[in-house]
Image (spheres, grey):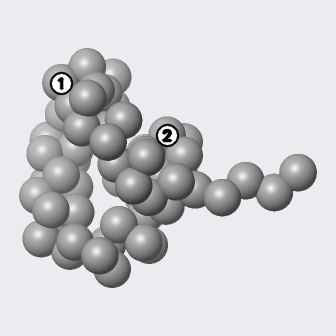
């Protein structure tokens, strides 16, 4: 799984996040690539929730 796909599964708009804060995006991507996605979720749970609120992926029904 790639980081961008992971963000999409967590309802986070990866493009918006990358455009708004490329340095933070790159840091998290590096950490994500070094560990299992479940471990990343457990370690960064509160951060993921903050990112989701800020960069919500728009869902169309």
Q: Is residue 7 visible?
A: no
* Residue that mark 2 sits on: 10
Image x and y of residue 45, in percent: 28, 26
Judge by depth and name the residue closer to the eye, 47 or 6.
Answer: 47
- Number of residues whose C-alpha sits closer than 10 Å to that of mark 1, classed few (under 14), some (14–19) or many (20 or more): few
Seen at 52% across and 54% down, the residue is 56
Going by the image, does 52 lie left or right of 42?
A: right
Seen at 22% across and 44% down, the residue is 32
Q: Is residue 31 visible?
A: yes
Tell me the quarter of the image containing the N terminus: top left
| Between discs 2 and 1, the one toward the N terminus | 2
Image x and y of residue 46, in percent: 26, 29
Seen at 39% across and 55% down, the residue is 54
Q: Is residue 40 above or below residue 27?
A: above
Report the number of discs.
Answer: 2
- Number of residues whose C-alpha sits closer than 10 Å to that of mark 2, classed few (under 14), some (14–19) or many (20 or more): some
Q: Is residue 59 above or below residue 20?
A: above
Disc 1 secondary structure class = helix
Image x and y of residue 6, in percent: 44, 45
* Residue that mark 1 sits on: 43
Disc 2 secondary structure class = loop
Going by the image, does 1 lie left or right of 36?
A: right
């Amino acid at each position: 799984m790639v980081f961008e796909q992971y963000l999409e599964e967590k309802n986070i708009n990866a493009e918006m996040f990358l455009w708004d804060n490329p340095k933070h995006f790159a840091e998290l991507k590096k950490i994500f690539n070094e560990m299992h996605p479940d471990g990343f979720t457990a370690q960064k749970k509160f951060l993921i929730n903050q990112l989701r609120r800020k960069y919500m992926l728009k869902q169309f029904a």
